[in-house]
Amino acid sequence: MTTALTITPNNRLSEQLRDLIEERIATGFYIPGDRLDESELATEFGVSRTPVREALFQLEMSGLIEIRPRRGAIVKNLTAQQLYEMFEVMAELESMCARLASRRMSESEVVALRKAHDACEEARLEGNPDKYYQLNKVFHESIYKGSHNTFLTEQAISLHRRLAPYRRLQLRVRGRMDKSLDEHERIVQAIEQGNEVDASDVVRSHVVVQGDRFADLVSMMNNFGGEQMDNANTGL
């Protein structure tokens, strides 16, 4: 059976494939240790092997898979403890971006950030978590770039991509989109006011996954077939 893909001007075929495979990993369709065969994927999606190879390369760069000699692409295992630690680092990186953005963003960049927030609001009203996720990514990357620190921006984008399927999965928890949007509003207001402390603190709490939020995420992983995640050593 072939899965239809639609190419849009702002979304390359390889990026669509990457996003779809990310989603499958997050939902347990592919589990750690699964081999992703280029030929089989190309046949399934009705494309050549070139965009599949590009998508797999992007996924390897983000750390979701590893490409082994003679075995091909293998889905990497990620324990709950590793996931928690990565979100901890992500929260600190984004907090630093927000602190710098509140000082360095130009007026036009702040306006663009507000527009990105408004777009997320529209997706929430539609009740579309996947659309919200894509627009949420634009919102966060606006803050990264608003830091005007190229190295920091690169590191934040890289880790964001690594956590992409898990951030997407969080949005399926009941009420999470509403909560996320409320937090976005507080972030935008702090940056608009040039309040470095509030911007940093709100972003940190927005991103870090702990307590009930972490338990919900692990539960979602298990419900979608990610039973191989080891959640015994989280300490939460």
Image (cartoon, grey):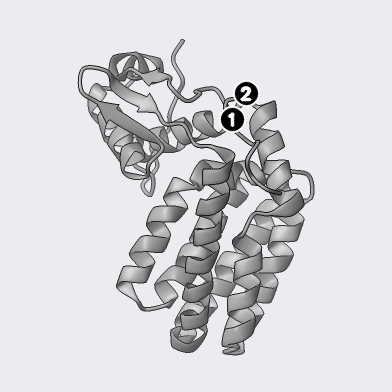
Q: Is residue 101 left or right of residue 216?
A: left
Q: Which residue is found at the position 58% from the left and 31% from the top? A: 229
Q: Is residue 97 left or right of residue 128?
A: left
Distance from disc 1 to disc 2, alpha carbons, whole Å, reads 7 Å
Residue type at numbered disc 1 = Thr
Report the front residue among 138 and 111: 138
Report the front residue among 111 and 80: 80
79 is higher (above) or lower (below) than 162: above
Q: Which residue is found at the position 73% from the left and 66% from the top? A: 182
Q: Are marks 1 and 2 in contact (CB under 8 Å)?
A: yes
Report the front residue among 163 and 192: 163
Q: Position of residue 205 (x, y in %)?
A: 66, 66
> Is residue 224 in sight in this rendering?
yes
Q: How many marks?
A: 2
132 is higher (above) or lower (below) than 138: above
Find residue 27 and name its label: 1
**Label 1 CA crowd tier, 10 Å (few <14, some 14–19, many 20+):** many
Q: Nearer the viewer, mark 1 or mark 2?
A: 2
**Label 2 CA crowd tier, 10 Å (few <14, some 14–19, many 20+):** some
Q: Which residue is found at the position 43% from the left and 19% from the top? A: 34
What element does badge 1 sit on? loop
Q: Position of residue 211 (x, y in %)?
A: 73, 53
What element does badge 2 sit on? loop
Find residue 17 and name its label: none
> Is residue 172 in sight in this rendering?
no
Residue type at numbered disc 2 = Gly
Question: Which residue, given by chain and number where applicable, does mark 2 sit on?
Answer: 225
Which residue in the rendered view is the most extreme toward the right? 175
Q: Position of residue 210 (x, y in %)?
A: 68, 54
